[in-house]
Image (cartoon, rainbow, N blue to C red):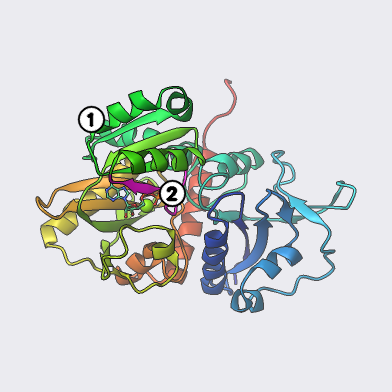
Amino acid sequence: MAKKLRVGIIFGGRSGEHDVSIRSAASVIESINRRKYTAVPIAISREGKWLSSAEAVNLLPGEAQSLLPIIRGSNSQDSVAILGDPSYAGLLSLDQKGGAANSQQLDVVFPVLHGPFGEDGTIQGLLEMANIPYVGCGVLASSCGMDKVAMKLLFLQAGLPLCKYVWFLRSQWQSDRAKIIKMITRKLGLPCFVKPANLGSSVGISRANDKASLERAVNFAARYDRKIVVEEAVDAREIECAVIGNNEPRASLPGEYVIHDPSAAFLDYTEKYSKTGHVEFVVPAALSKSLTTRIQKMAVQAFQSIDGSGLARVDFFLTRKSNKLLINELNTMPGLTDVSGYPKMWAASGLSYAQMLDLLIELALERHREKSQNKTTRA
Ligand SMILES: Nc1ncnc2c1ncn2[C@@H]1O[C@H](COP(=O)(O)OP(=O)(O)O)[C@@H](O)[C@H]1O
Ligand SMILES: [Mg+2]
């Protein structure tokens, strides 16, 4: 039998989605094919410290813990690191004085990190430097997928339909609020949605219905980012589509967040992760065949417009009155928890969680092989 691949699963991280990342990683560890892969847990604390595998295991829920090999001989005080120097190409244990104690080989890394410092090209940059294959989008696609302003520009360039929006800097808001409020009400009107440009899981997002709530919403978003996006509020169904692949990506059957309780004004953090019962993710979404095909085509175009690889989830609005399809956003490391849309859409499209992981790891290796064909010298 072929040698088991060692898969570094990085989770936690310095973002507001730290806890979601732990849940996503737990699902990955629970579903990964243990005959083919050895999962090596690597956790990053909220402060950015890389924790030893022994400490990383402790952050996981009991079921995921029980599936991991017993980690022997690791001192829980030790920390670990991946270095940009490709000659180490693995996980280095650091002793208490910060010296390198030993290194463990990693054949591939799965950065199961959501939001800033994980989904935004930063960890991808480190893994490129280290020359370790990794699951998901590269540096460019990750950072463009994280920044809602850059993402919208690439979507527009690809001819994809979006809702009306404006953006500005926190410094502009701080120096002339009246001017910004005037611009928003003139270009978009109210109600509108105010968002930090670089976040996820609805953190920092709120709906503004009047000028007073608009001011509060911008102040709130400005706590999270130096760039703020404001969009017209659309009355729409929320449809999602999963994409997988590198140069020839394919799209899943679309799913839909169906809101059962009007008290859930929008998909905020609680509605997304707390099983409130107000919303339900339904796959396949109740859509005509032609609309399903259009969504799948647009999801692939959105993926290609940011130069995606591996995976992404593309989120749409389907307006209730005029049945207009708009792209809301793309997530390069979508939630992978047991309640998340991405794995559910693949399951409904015939790809189990374990098969999806297999394919994602294969795509990571393929992308790495393809890149290593590039010449790096002039001669
Ligand atoms: N322009 C909009 N009109 C109506 N609802 C919106 C709009 N933008 C966002 N929302 C609501 O807020 C949620 C989170 O917004 P989104 O842009 O997807 O941010 P995140 O990256 O945090 O998921 C959406 O799923 C939707 O419920
Ligand atoms: Mg979203």
Q: Magenta span: helix, strand or loop, mainly?
A: loop
Q: Position of residue 152 (x, y in %)?
A: 32, 36
Residue 318 percent across, percent down from the top left: 19, 53
Position of residue 246 in the picture relative to residue 8 (left or right): left
Observer-nearest of 248 and 185 = 185
Question: Residue at horizontal 26%, vertical 58%?
Answer: 239
- As helix, strand or loop, the secondary structure at mark 2 comes to loop
The relative height of residue 55 versus residue 198 in the rendered view (above or below) is below
Residue 228, visible in the rendered structure: yes
* Position of residue 249 measured from the top left corner of the image (x, y, whole percent): 34, 50
Total marks in image: 2
Residue 130 magenta: no
Nearer-the-camera pick, 229 or 296: 229
Q: Residue 307, can we see it?
A: no
* Residue wearing tag 1: 187
Q: Residue at x 54, y 57 (%)?
A: 112
Nearest the viewer among 371 and 149 is 149
Look at label 2 and name its amino acid.
Answer: Thr
> Does residue 23 sit above or below 327 in this rendering?
below
Per the image, label 1 sits on a secondary structure element best described as helix
Q: Which residue is mark 2?
A: 332
Q: Earlier in the sequence, mark 2 or mark 1?
A: 1
Which residue: 36% across, 68% down? 344
Residue 143 disc label:
none
> Which residues make up the magenta segment?
197-209
Query: Residue 353: x, y in percent?
Result: 44, 70
* Few, some or many residues within 10 Å of mark 1 (<14, 14–19, 20+): some
Three-letter code, disc 1: Lys
Q: Is residue 198 left or right of residue 286?
A: right
Residues at discs 2 and 1 in contact (Cβ within 8 Å) = no
